[in-house]
Amino acid sequence: MKPTLIIVHATMSYPYENIDAQKLWVRSINEGHKNIPYHFYIRKDGTVSQHILLTEPGHHCKGHNNHSIGICYEGGLNECGYPSDTRTPAQKKKIKDIITNLGYMFPGIKTIGMNIAHRSYNSPCFDAVAEYND
């Protein structure tokens, strides 16, 4: 796989929810996936887990899986359930670090949010294009 896109997602979970990798796996199975659909998952504390090899396509964004890497962060809803940028400083740093490293590995790769790939989604609840593309 030669990725041309990084697609950023949010779990669309509340600030008080703790979605560890096991809960994300159960959620993914319940949504019809065979496994966690993202290459990388970033918890609120900045912990990163990788779930798909970079040589393998994910299953995080229909129509883009064969040429994209999926990054998902825990959060995306405010206390009232509205889509909001709830990224912690640790998450912002880890997302930026991953995107920077992927840029070295795959020159020319661009970053977008799921909301750009599929306009019916609010995820990732911030403008990933403006934030991560120079």
Image (cartoon, helix red, strand yellow):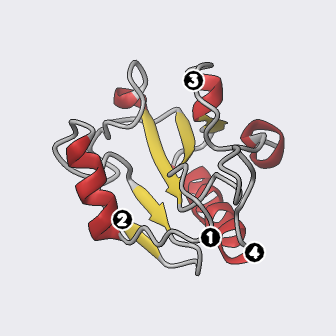
- Given residues 99 and 87, the one toward you in this image is 87
Q: Earlier in the sequence, mark 4 or mark 3?
A: 4
Q: Earlier in the sequence, mark 2 or mark 1?
A: 2
The answer to whether 84 appears left or right of 1 in the picture is right
3 shown above or below 92: above
Q: Identity of the amino acid at label 4? A: Pro
- Furthest-left residue in this view: 34
Q: Read off the residue under disc 4.
A: 89
Percent across and percent down for residue 104 are: 59, 55
The circle on residue 117 is: 3
CB within 8 Å, label 2 to label 4: no
Q: Identity of the amino acid at label 1? A: Lys
Q: Secondary structure at mark 2?
A: strand
Percent across and percent down for residue 84 are: 74, 49
Q: Identity of the amino acid at label 3? A: Ala
Q: Read off the residue under disc 1.
A: 94
CB within 8 Å, label 3 to label 2: no
Q: Read off the residue under disc 2.
A: 50
Q: Identity of the amino acid at label 2? A: Gln
Q: Residue at x 42, y 30 (%)?
A: 61
Q: Earlier in the sequence, mark 2 or mark 4?
A: 2
Picture mark count:
4
Q: CA distance from mark 4 to mark 3?
A: 25 Å
Q: Secondary structure at mark 1?
A: helix
The answer to whether 22 appears left or right of 43 in the picture is left
Q: CA distance from mark 4 to mark 1?
A: 9 Å
Q: CA distance from mark 3 to mark 1?
A: 22 Å
CB within 8 Å, label 2 to label 1: no
